Image (spheres, rainbow, N blue to C red):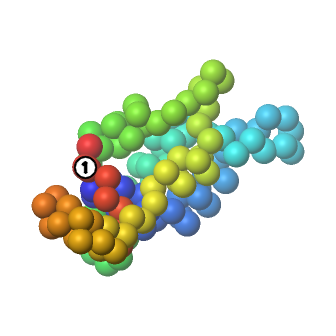
Amino acid sequence: EQICTNIWRNKASLLLNFKFIEEEVAPGRISGRVSKENLRRTLKTLNASLEASQGVGVHGAPLTTDQIDILVDHAVFDDSHTLDYQAFLDSFQVVDMGSSREGQELAASVGAVPGTPSSPEA
């Protein structure tokens, strides 16, 4: 859950980073894709920013090295070994589990907070 929350809360910053380092398909033509190494580098940059703020505030606590490795290892890369970063970011959605009785019971049972990403922590 912490991983999903961090990605969701920092989507705008991550998107700017991805746009800055994305792979060029030809000079001046951007692809909307990043390599595995650039994904790892971007997540480490986010982590450094979170560590600098000492994990306080709305942006969350830093990810562990293992959590970064899990995100990178489980991301979907194509045959050219690049990742569609917009699709990656879009996969971290807010799920309102409080809109139904079953959702509220599920949120209580897993300790989720309604209105925040609800995927289990990897």
- Residue 71 position within the rendered picture, expressed as x and y whole percent measured from the top left: 39, 41
Q: Toward the viewer: 78 or 17?
A: 78
Side of 26 relative to 77 (left or right)? right
Q: Quadrant of residue 66?
A: top left
Give coordinates of residue 40: x percent, y percent.
Answer: 46, 41
Taking the spot 55% from the left edge, 30% from the top edge, the residue there is 77
Residue drawn at the location 75% of the way across and 41% of the way down = 31
Nearest the camera: 51 or 88? 88
The residue furthest front is 101
Crowd band around label 1 with a 10 angstrom C-alpha radius: few (<14), some (14–19), many (20+): few
Residue 58 visible to an observer of this rendering? yes
Image quadrant occupied by the N terminus: bottom left
The residue sitting at the top extreme is: 79
Q: Is residue 52 left or right of residue 111?
A: right
**31 is higher (above) or lower (below) than 60:** above
Q: What amino acid is found at the position of numbered circle 1 in the picture?
A: Glu
Residue at 49% from the left image edge and 51% from the top image edge: 91
Residue identifier under label 1: 121
Residue found farthest to the left = 109
Q: Residue at x 70, y 39 (%)?
A: 23
Q: Dot 1: what SS? A: loop
Residue 25 versus residue 106: which sits nearer the camera?
Answer: 106
